[in-house]
């Protein structure tokens, strides 16, 4: 039997309805098919770390900025720059000034007046020409990012350590002035509410139904980058339920008919046609097993097998070595068998 070639959500549920001979005007059956398609879709998506859910995003980490000086006044939320060239892109960066005992977030910048608005009033000693460090260590992630898989950059032989927000902040507390390329990172997120103001609600009539948006940000340590560099991020794409007719599942096009098989099984079993339901369930299971076994679709890559070369040890391990990768290169020499 030739597999059904479907592309969109509409293609999928229409294919199911045609096979069970139910018109699209039957709202109850249509909704049941749509629910079944989404249930099967979700069961497939979260079954494995599929390669088709994985994508990459690059973030440019800008170097710290400390040109000029700032006029910092105790109790004020403004820093006034002299000899500075602050830009609007620096909103959201962090700044340390004077004795650098506290870190403040920049919430606004008047570019013309070269004035920074801080997240809190300055608690340090008043200084009309204080040195400062302005840096960025919070980086926005793509809105479709659900989970980080791998983060790395070209200045380190190993991926960054993915830690919890608490562990990363403990590192910042222990090493408040740490500079350099990132060695660890974490993800934080929050929701923005964009509905009506609470004062405008009419009790028993209005509800907190405004739109919400997931905002994820990547935090790095060391948090003060002394040079610019690029972070490469592999992440798992967030999967939303199929809703609009034009929505397309993330499943590769040549395998999307698996959703038709799963929904057909559900619908026939719903109508007590058990034998037909089991037939389509068997086809669904067979397709799923083939997808799981195919390295083109999963992220289970073949293991590296080293042949023809061995590694000869030259010196003992130095426990003080900061970079295990470079230590390996220095102390082991490859030679042919």
Image: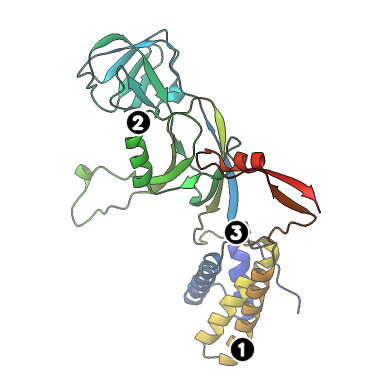
Front-lying residue, 303 or 334: 334
Residue 222 in percent (x, y) is at 44, 34
- Circles 2 and 3: CB distance less than 8 Å? no
Above or below residue 288? Residue 337 is above
Secondary structure type for disc 1: helix
Q: What residue is shown at x 31% (from left), y 27% (from top)?
A: 103
Residue 147 in percent (x, y) is at 48, 53
From the image, tell me which residue sits under label 2. 176
Secondary structure type for disc 2: loop
Residue 281 in percent (x, y) is at 60, 82
- Circles 1 and 2: CB distance less than 8 Å? no
Q: Residues within 10 Å of mark 3 (few under 14, many from 20)?
A: some
Between the residue at mark 2 and the residue at mark 3, the CA separation in whole angstroms equals: 42 Å
Secondary structure type for disc 3: loop
From the image, tell me which residue sits under label 1. 276
Q: Is residue 307 left or right of residue 82?
A: right
**Sooner in the amino-acid sequence: mark 1 or mark 2:** 2
Q: Is residue 133 left or right of residue 24?
A: left
Q: Residues within 10 Å of mark 1 (few under 14, many from 20)?
A: some
Q: Is residue 52 left or right of residue 322?
A: right
Q: Quadrant of the N terminus?
A: bottom right
Q: Residues within 10 Å of mark 2 (few under 14, many from 20)?
A: some
**Sooner in the amino-acid sequence: mark 2 or mark 3:** 2
* Nearer the camera: disc 1 or disc 2: 2
Front-lying residue, 230 or 279: 230
From the image, tell me which residue sits under label 3. 250
């Amino acid at each position: 039997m030739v597999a059904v070639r479907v592309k969109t959500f509409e293609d999928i549920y229409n294919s199911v309805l045609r096979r069970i001979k139910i018109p699209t005007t039957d709202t109850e059956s249509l909704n049941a098919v749509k629910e079944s398609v989404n249930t099967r879709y979700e069961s497939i998506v979260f079954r494995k770390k599929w390669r088709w859910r994985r994508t990459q995003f690059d973030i440019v980490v800008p170097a710290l900025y400390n040109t000029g000086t700032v006029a910092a006044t105790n109790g004020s939320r403004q820093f006034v720059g002299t000899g500075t060239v602050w830009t609007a892109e620096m909103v959201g960066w962090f700044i340390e000034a004077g004795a650098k005992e506290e870190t403040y977030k920049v919430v606004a910048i008047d570019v013309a007046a070269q004035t920074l608005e801080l997240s809190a009033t300055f608690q340090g000693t008043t200084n009309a020409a204080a040195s400062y460090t302005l840096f960025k260590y919070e980086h926005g992630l793509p809105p479709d990012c659900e989970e980080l898989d791998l983060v790395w950059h070209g200045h380190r032989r190993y991926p960054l350590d993915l830690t919890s927000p608490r562990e990363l902040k403990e590192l910042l507390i222990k090493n408040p002035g740490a500079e350099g390329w990132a060695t660890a990172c974490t993800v934080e997120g929050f929701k923005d509410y964009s509905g009506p103001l609470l004062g405008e609600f009419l009790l028993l009539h209005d509800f907190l139904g405004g739109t919400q948006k997931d905002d994820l940000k990547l935090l790095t340590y060391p948090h003060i980058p002394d040079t610019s560099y690029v972070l490469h991020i592999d992440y798992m794409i967030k999967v939303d339920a199929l809703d609009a007719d034009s929505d397309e599942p993330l499943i590769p096009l040549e395998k999307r008919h698996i959703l038709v098989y799963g929904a057909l099984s559900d619908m026939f079993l719903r109508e007590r046609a058990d034998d037909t339901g089991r037939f389509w369930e068997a086809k669904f299971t067979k397709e799923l097993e083939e997808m799981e076994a195919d390295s083109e679709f999963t992220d289970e890559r073949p293991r590296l097998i080293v042949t023809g070369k061995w590694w000869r040890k030259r010196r003992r391990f130095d426990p003080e070595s900061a970079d295990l990768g470079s230590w390996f290169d220095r102390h082991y020499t490859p030679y042919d068998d």
